[in-house]
């Protein structure tokens, strides 16, 4: 149990393969490494992290819904669903929580289909292109947004 404000970090499909998945694009750190980096930063900032991943759109929707009333903010790397999912956008909206959209790569420098994000329509801010360090930047930014920094 903790009375620290909690930030939910949601990771979409294929991010469980980080470290071995196209490392020239996504880097060599595993998702567990990234989670450790987030927890380290959170401990300094006095916030708690609820770090999740799923390959299933519906599971991600249920996960996001559960943040309502429980978390203070959501950081999300929706991965491939960034570019396709109205359901994830709707789920984020219904939580009424601040949302930071996060990508390891910079989708705007990549294929055209990655230039469109449904999630951006509800994001307070977007961090992309900084690899795994982007997660640390996002924790910093969210801590400030929820006024815990
Ligand atoms: C990603 C970018 C997406 O376009 C891609 O589908 C991913 C990862 C990123 O973190 O750079 O799976 O969200």
Image (spheres, helix red, strand yellow):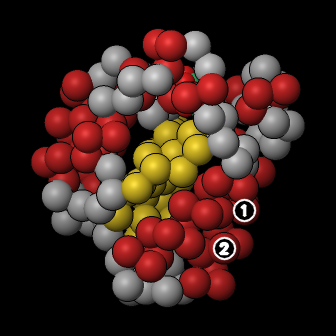
Q: Mark 1 points at which residue?
A: 37
Residue 136 appears at what percent x and percent y?
A: 65, 63
Q: In the figure, 138 relative to 103: above or below? A: below
Horizontal side, residue 8 vs residue 31: left or right: left
Of helix, strand and loop, which one carries label 2? helix
Q: Name the residue under label 2.
A: 41
| One can see residue 32 in this view | no
Q: Where is residue 109 in the image (x, y as percent from the top left)?
A: 63, 26
Which residue is more in the foreground, 122 or 57? 122
Classify mark 1: helix, strand or loop: helix
Q: Where is residue 125 in the image (x, y as percent from the top left)?
A: 40, 56
Considering only vertical position in the picture, is 68 above or below 143?
Answer: above
Q: How crowded is mark 1: few (under 14 residues within 10 Å), some or many (20 or more)?
A: some
Q: Does the residue labelled 2 lie within 8 Å of ligand 1?
A: no
Q: Quadrant of ligand 1?
A: top right
- In the depicted view, which residue is nearer to us: 135 or 62? 135
Q: In this view, does 25 lie to the left or right of 49?
A: right
Q: Which residue is drawn at 49% across and 86% down?
A: 149
The residue at the point 21 percent across, 40 percent down is 91
Q: Does residue 52 appear left or right of residue 146 in this picture?
A: right
Q: In this view, does 89 lie to the left or right of 79?
A: left
Quick check: can you spot residue 36?
A: yes
Q: Is residue 31 or residue 112 the one in the foreground?
A: 112
| Residue at x 48% of width, y 59% of height | 50
Q: Which mark is residue 100?
A: none
């Amino acid at each position: 149990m903790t009375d620290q404000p909690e930030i939910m970090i949601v990771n979409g499909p294929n991010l469980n393969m980080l470290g071995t998945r196209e490392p020239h694009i996504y880097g060599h750190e595993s998702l567990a490494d990234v989670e450790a980096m987030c927890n380290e930063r959170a401990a300094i900032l006095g916030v708690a992290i609820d770090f999740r991943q799923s390959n299933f759109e519906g599971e991600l929707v249920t996960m996001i819904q559960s943040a309502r009333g429980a978390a203070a903010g959501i950081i999300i790397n929706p991965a491939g669903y960034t570019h396709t999912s109205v359901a994830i956008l709707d789920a984020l909206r219904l939580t009424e929580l601040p949302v930071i959209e996060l990508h390891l790569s910079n989708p705007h420098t990549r294929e055209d289909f990655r230039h469109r994000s449904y999630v951006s329509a509800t994001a307070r801010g977007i961090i992309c292109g900084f690899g795994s360090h982007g997660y640390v930047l996002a924790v910093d930014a969210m801590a400030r947004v929820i006024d815990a920094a």
